[in-house]
Image: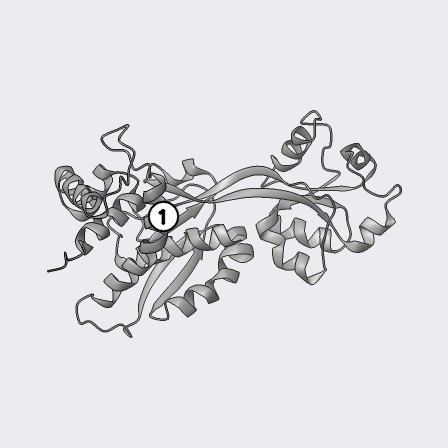
Amino acid sequence: MPVRPPLHALHIFCVVVREGGFRQAAQALHLTPGAISRQVQALEEHLKQVLFERASSNAATLTAAGKQLHENAAGKMAHLIQVLEPGGRPARRHSILVDTSVTLAMHWLIPQLPDFRQRYPHITVDVRTADGDINPAAPVDVFLRREEAELRGLPSHCFMRERSILVSSQAFASALRPHPTANMRWLARAARIGMRSRPDLWPGWCQAHGMKAGALAPTIEFDNTVLAIQAAIQGLGMLVVPEAFVAAILASGALLRIAPASVETGSYSYAVGRRRASPRVEAFTQWLAERANAS
């Protein structure tokens, strides 16, 4: 008789990865850490593969085999559990509340949501925007923030690395004399757009190109990313901006990528709200990481 696959152990494996550790998974599932560990060991024995590094008793560091399994199984497992919720009605609609910044919502999350709706038509994503520290006690399913500290101690997971690029309008770039070259010092003669919400971007660009952090200060500043992008589209100057926020604008031709290089300028993390873990939240967070990797 063929051995039945340990589907319960596979679900627990996915929760350990999502929560970031055996202890956190035990809390989320209301089990003991020992029970979590035994299920993972049963899965490893079934697959004849080691899924987690054992450097720490609570570590959730995946081996190569663990990463492969998670990529192949997590989204499917989340959908299967959703289908098997009480009532067994996959057409039943559910909603999750996502709390994020205006910029991330406008320029990245909302453009990605049609893909989520196509994959999970029974889950509605409600988006609310706020900046700064979260309220961990708020009835929010998933928080998204650029600064991990703003997640106020909730277990967090990085889902997207931020890389920034130099852009301007086509008309502004064409008017530059001399034309842009690999030597970034020509920027000292160009108008430079800055944003008060991201004072780190121009200094980071300078340092990445071998200059002092303050070598190229903005010559004109706006309060936020949304206004700075619009200023660049209108030809007011050069802008260092996260690439993910202007991908569609670049494709439309309203902005032009001036230099081929990009610089790493941060990352984005998510945290599941307290006692908000559910199959639909797991489906969303798994999708979140997949879309970030794709973009």
Can residue 126 be seen in this snapshot? yes
Is 209 located above or below residue 129 in the figure?
above
Q: Amino acid type of disc 1?
A: Gln
Q: How many marks?
A: 1
Residue at horizontal 27%, vertical 72%?
Answer: 90
Can residue 222 be seen in this snapshot? no
Position of 268 compared to 64: left or right? right
Q: What is the x, y in percent for residue 14?
A: 27, 49
Residue at horizontal 50%, vertical 54%?
Answer: 294
Q: Secondary structure at mark 1?
A: helix
Is 100 located above or below residue 127 in the figure?
above
Q: Locate residue 171: give its quadrant.
A: bottom right
Q: What is the x, y in percent for residue 133?
A: 42, 41
Residue at horizontal 63%, vertical 45%?
Answer: 241
Q: Locate residue 153: give its quadrant.
A: top left
Which residue is most to the front? Answer: 1
Looking at the rendered image, the quarter that the N terminus falls into is bottom left
Q: What's the colour scheme?
A: one colour
Q: What is the x, y in percent for residue 139?
A: 30, 53
Is 252 located above or below residue 273 in the figure?
below
Position of 249 compared to 113: left or right? right
Q: What is the x, y in percent for residue 185?
A: 79, 32
Residue on which the image places disc 1: 68
Position of 135 compared to 241: left or right? left
